[in-house]
Amino acid sequence: MKVNPLALNPERYLNYNDVLRRKFSNRVQKISINAGFTCPNRDGSKGWGGCTYCNNQSFSPDYCRPTKNIRQQVEEGIGFFNKAKYENQLYLAYFQSYTNTYDSIEKLRRLYEEALAHPKVAGIIVGTRPDCVNDELLDYFAELSGRYYVMIEYGVESTNDDTLRFINRGHDYACAETAIRNTAQRGIYTGAHLILGLPGESRELILSHADTISQLPLSAIKLHQLQLIKGTQMLRQYEENPGIFKLYTVDEYVDLLIDFIERMNPSIAIERFVSQSPAALLFAPDWKLKNFEFVDKVKKELQARNTYQGARYISGRQ
């Protein structure tokens, strides 16, 4: 019987950082870039107000401000992370805030290539919505990926259309599936982002996301817990109707994650388990754990259960 290599891996899951290290044979660090984009869910093209959970201040570092040009943000980001012992470290410019493909192809090319012009930048990661790409742009990314590392990271958030409507996402899951397939078939690294614990989603529904998303040709996935952020519509919804929310404790979320990881396609690298918002913006849940402390809990629980990513994965299961 063929043994899943992740069962023998000390981490017991496919760690995206390990995948990057093998590809570059060097340390690689992401630098967040804010290029001043907006979102079709904010400017009236798809809707107003954005997704109900969204406050971009919750994940933008201090050096990342749209008042600075791309070159300046790259240089400040490298300065922020650069240490003498990592002088050969390479960087990936992460276009993170809002929808980073939401402009003309001419402007997008200029912004991406301004970041790539820095000699220590080995590639770009572009965060976007699945309804904001087209064939012309994907063909450009395919050409660019022949010279640089290129990953397109799609906000999927949930595979359930009722949830997507409730959070005012502005697209359905079929849109995400189409965009991911169209991207991956061009040989472009393709990522997805899911929020576990969105309002109204039961444990079984959350776990079904693993079954569904695992059928897609993804390179990597980011997972994180639902967080209620100050100044968002979702926090107002929680205050009005807390019964539709399940705010997980640390141990409850770790337990959920282990079940989720078991059902994940073992060929999809896991980039993140949790998100950490600034304390000044976070309403709940406040776990008071650093990212590495949480990851350590996940690894220990995988060991304790003697399980691993893909242990319950079934190809073709939806």
Image (cartoon, rainbow, N blue to C red):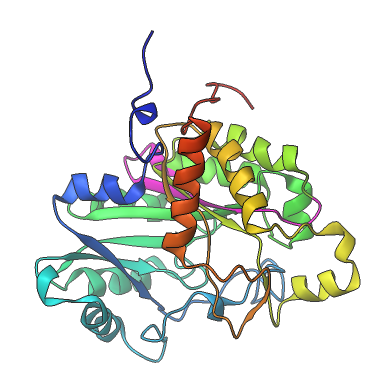
Where does the magenta region start and end? 183-200
Split into 4 quadrants, where in the image is the N terminus?
top left
Split into 4 quadrants, where in the image is the C terminus?
top right
Q: Which residue is farthest top?
A: 1
Q: Which residue is farthest bottom?
A: 67
Residue 152's spot in the image, x, y percent?
40, 54
* Residue at point 65%, 67% (across, down): 227
Q: Which residue is farthest front?
A: 304
Q: Nearer the viewer, residue 98 or 26?
A: 26
Q: Is residue 156 visible in the rendered structure shown here? A: yes
* Residue at point 47%, 68% (across, down): 290
* Residue at point 81%, 52% (across, down): 200
Q: How many marks?
A: 0
160, above or below 37, in the image: above
Residue 208's spot in the image, x, y percent?
67, 35
45, above or below 273, in the image: below
Residue 279 lies in what quarter of the image? bottom right
